[in-house]
């Protein structure tokens, strides 16, 4: 049959198989977490428990949220923060929804976490997640980006990945959507 090798070759190629696995993984994720997010909205639960043991406010269609829920960041850094044995203060620059700030705050040796997140909608999620995990006494959230100068800047946002926000327009995840943000350069310029 002419062209049959091309037809069957496409559906057995490594790229096609990987794409199917990715789509099956996304489908499984949505089947699991969309009903959970409805439960939170209906008041049946307070948040979604991630594989890292912290609860997050539902943000199901965001890639960063998905990585937090599924343990996509691995365990090297999370284990290091939870098990660190000396007193420490953590600066979480680009805290996003707060996963690593929340993990650090679980450590009894953590004296304080200062979490910087400049994007307004992501900052709201960060604050909600800090409250949700009862970490307001240990985590100070600052709505600003850390920069080499204090002032204002335009940040480029991603539609599907809150972690893709960047001051550089050439970033792969950036879109046409932007937001004016505050930048800080030293402790005197922080609120």
Image (cartoon, rainbow, N blue to C red):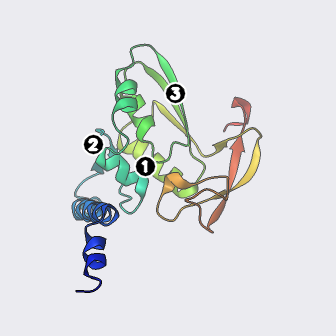
Q: Are marks 1 and 3 in contact (CB under 8 Å)?
A: no
Q: Are marks 2 and 1 in contact (CB under 8 Å)?
A: no
Determine the CA span between mark 2 and mark 1: 19 Å
Residue 177, percent from left and from top: 61, 67
Q: Crowdedness of circle 1 by 10 Å Cα count: few (<14), some, many (20+)?
A: some
Give the numbered dot on residue 90. 3
Q: Residues within 10 Å of mark 3 (few under 14, many from 20)?
A: some
Helix or strand or loop: what does disc 2 sit on? loop
Quadrant into which the C terminus falls: top right
Residue under numbered circle 1: 128
Q: Is residue 91 left or right of residue 11?
A: right
Q: Nearer the viewer, residue 122 or 163?
A: 163
Q: Earlier in the sequence, mark 2 or mark 1?
A: 2
Relative to 113, is 98 above or below? below
The tag earlier along the polypeptide, 3 or 2, is: 2
Element class at badge 1: helix
Marks 3/2: CA distance? 22 Å
Q: CA distance from mark 1 to mark 3?
A: 19 Å
Name the residue at the front extreme.
Answer: 2
Q: Residue furthest bottom?
A: 1
Q: Position of residue 154 (x, y in %)?
A: 70, 57
Are there few (<14), some (14-19), or many (20+) residues within 10 Å of tag 2? Answer: some
Instruction: Pick the residue in front: 24 or 129.
Output: 24
Q: Earlier in the sequence, mark 1 or mark 3?
A: 3
Q: Quadrant of residue 59?
A: bottom left
Q: Nearer the viewer, residue 17 or 28?
A: 17
Q: Is residue 72 visible?
A: yes
Please tell me the numbered disc located at residue 51. Answer: 2
């Amino acid at each position: 049959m002419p062209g049959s090798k091309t037809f069957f070759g496409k559906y057995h190629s490594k790229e096609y198989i990987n794409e199917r696995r990715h789509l099956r993984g996304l489908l499984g994720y949505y089947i699991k977490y969309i009903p959970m997010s409805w439960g939170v909205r209906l008041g049946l639960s307070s948040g979604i428990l991630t594989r890292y043991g912290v609860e997050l406010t539902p943000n199901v269609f965001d890639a960063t949220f998905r990585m937090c829920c599924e343990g996509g960041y691995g365990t090297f850094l999370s284990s290091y923060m939870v098990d660190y044995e000396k007193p420490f203060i953590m600066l979480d620059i680009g805290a996003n929804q707060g996963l690593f700030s929340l993990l650090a705050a679980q450590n009894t040796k953590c004296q304080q976490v200062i979490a910087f997140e400049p994007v307004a909608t992501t900052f709201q999620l960060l604050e909600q997640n800090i409250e949700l995990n009862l970490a307001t006494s240990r985590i100070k959230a600052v709505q600003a980006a850390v920069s080499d100068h204090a002032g204002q800047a335009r940040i480029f946002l991603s539609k599907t990945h809150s972690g893709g926000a960047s001051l550089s327009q050439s970033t792969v995840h950036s879109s046409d959507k932007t937001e004016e943000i505050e930048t800080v350069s030293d402790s005197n310029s922080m609120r």
